[in-house]
Image: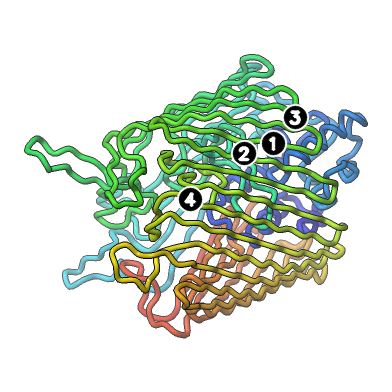
Amino acid sequence: MFVMAFKSFGQTDSIGPIVERILEFYLENNEIEDFDNNTAFERLYDFGENPLNLNKATAADFQELFFLTPVEIQAIIDHRNTYGDFLAVEELQTVDALGITTARMMLPFCMVGERGNFSGFREIIAAGKSQLFLKYKRTLEDKAGYLPNSNGETRYLGDPNYGYIRYRFNSGRRLKAGFTAEKDAGEQFFGEKSKYGFDFYSAYVYAEKLTPWLEQLSLGDYTMSMGQGLILHNGFGYGKSAFVTSFKKNNQHLRQYSSVNENLYFRGAGATVKIFDQLRLTLAYSYKKIDGSINLDTIDNSEPEAFFSSLLQGGLHRTSRELENKGSITQQNIGGVLEYRYKGVKLGLNHLQYYFSSPLLRDPVPYRRFYFNGDRLVNTSFDYDYTYKNLNIFGELAMSDNGGKAMSHNALIALSRRADVAVNYRKFDKDYQVLEANAFSEGSLPIDEQALYIGAEIRPNNEWKLSAYQDIWKHEWLRYRVDAPSAGKEFLARIEYTKKRKFNAYVMYRYEQKQRNSSLNTEKIDPLTDFTVQKLRVHFSQKVNKDLEFKARAEVSQANSDNKGTQGNLLFFDVLYKPIGRSFDVIGRYAMFDANGFDSRVYMYENDLLYEYSIPFFQNKGRRFYLIYRQSLARGLTLETKFSQTIYQDIDEISSGTELISGPSKTDFKVQLRWSF
């Protein structure tokens, strides 16, 4: 279905719809819950407006197109070295090991020939383009946090309105700048507890190739990535998904940060300098205040010492307690990457240090015995990457300052133009300590795991694609709700059929088996029982013409544990009307779901406003619909709205605590104004 997005390229004034459809494809077919949509959209958008020169791009440049594998990148470079410069972007379809779908996917983001090379600062500024976003959201039903008690007080200090302002300036990939301001629902706006208006502010300046030796400079808010994520990673590279060979982490070390997550970024400065052609050094410093649950140690008779028991990741400051925790801890980071590149070889030495103003002392439950505690953490790693023809091997070996180790070794092999295989072996010690890693793993962090993953993708022709993976793992130590060493396995298989860029259908089956505490036991130490989840999905989409597309999906989810089973069912229908040459788009969905347990809940990707995405899950029985309308008001000015409602048939209350809604329905309204100039 990727190719459907490109048929209209050249027929629209904006690359935005094409980028949006690519990301829709990635997200609607996978439950990628931690996907950074802002960064993904911006990167492809930049390449759409400033295409990559096929005849000058390096392997590192091609890696910015996150859908390319290392083997495919090497195939493009080998083709260029063998046959000379590309004469047209369509020549990509003749590259060995590059599938026809991937080649077509690259077309909007690549070029041959030259464009103006603006070297002066005034020229760079003059060539820049700006975008301004204004966004508003609200849940129409009353939530418990906004309802006054007998004294007329509410638990939420602010109103239920969400507000967002964002400005971005881009001059190709040479210079980027922007700022973001956000107020979550329930947070005050210019109130007693919010004297500066919005609850969250962020700003950045990012530049490339300022001088022959200064390749990158990040000021303000930015992200940093190292190796394969055993220490830190905020770039692309997915976990287990239907893209069975696409788990390698993209490795641009510094990027501007423009999202609204209030934790996953550095605040300070970072730079990459070229020591000589093969050797580069990246240095970074960050100082920021983070949310923590502050406590006082009063065991002895001396003056009480402050510590925090957990890092709070929600970024919400709606209640007095949440405001007390806001910015209560200072976090400093010092890090660096020394990287050597020569032809198909890349070697990296990575280092990152954390300093906290108060020590982190977690609750001493058994499964957290080896977790990091203290006010200083040091991580060091070595990563490698080697590509030769149709083979790419890469990995990382890491260590924390307590001696805990972690390793991940990988191989991607293009057996032919129509078959790829991926292998991952990983081993993480139970006492390896890390805070912001984002590695390929079963757990959320690369801790206490030994596993083997094998994935394969076969494309018999341009219409059929078969993909599958098997992952087997074990844990040496205890885990949350698992009071003994445990093991698990996961299997996924998918068959996809695409016909003439108009029809797409796939069937996907997923099986996962884990171990967890038995709910039947009454002893303090629970015996383990097998917990299994099976999911079967059937999906199809049909383009009726250039303007109209239909989609439908049916999914069944079954979960079993302690000889008890639950089941979830999902059925939805989409209509996408995007008339070429007209000034509006309309997208609608009607969905029905019935899941009688949390373990059998069902997920579904939803279309949303530009730069937003959501993959909500549903349980209980009900139905949901949404309608999105986009209207071009004038050149560069677009208005977007989304109205959605979920109606439950078997419950009279939704959510709990301060988010409790008394009633069976939840209705949301969003509106966004986007100005490009």
Report the disc number at residue 498.
none
Spatial CA distance of label 2 from label 1 is 8 Å
Q: If the image is split into quadrants, where does the C terminus sit? A: top right
Earlier sequence position, callout 1 versus callout 4 = 1
Q: Nearer the viewer, mark 4 or mark 3?
A: 4
Question: Would you place residue 289 above or below residue 23 in this image?
Answer: above
Give the residue pinned by disc 3. 58
Give the residue pinned by disc 4. 444
Mark 2 neighbour density, 10 Å: few (under 14) some (14–19) many (20 or more) = some
Question: Would you place residue 482 above or below residue 36 in this image?
Answer: below
Circles 2 and 3: CB distance less than 8 Å? no
Q: What secondary structure is found at the residue carrying circle 2?
A: strand
State the image coordinates of residue 161 (x, y, percent, origin top left). Answer: 40, 61
> Please, what is the three-letter code of the amino acid marked with disc 4?
Ser
Q: Is residue 102 left or right of residue 538?
A: right
Report the disc number at residue 393.
1
Q: What secondary structure is found at the residue carrying circle 4?
A: loop
Spatial CA distance of label 4 from label 3 is 33 Å
Q: Which of these two is toward me, 519 or 78?
A: 519
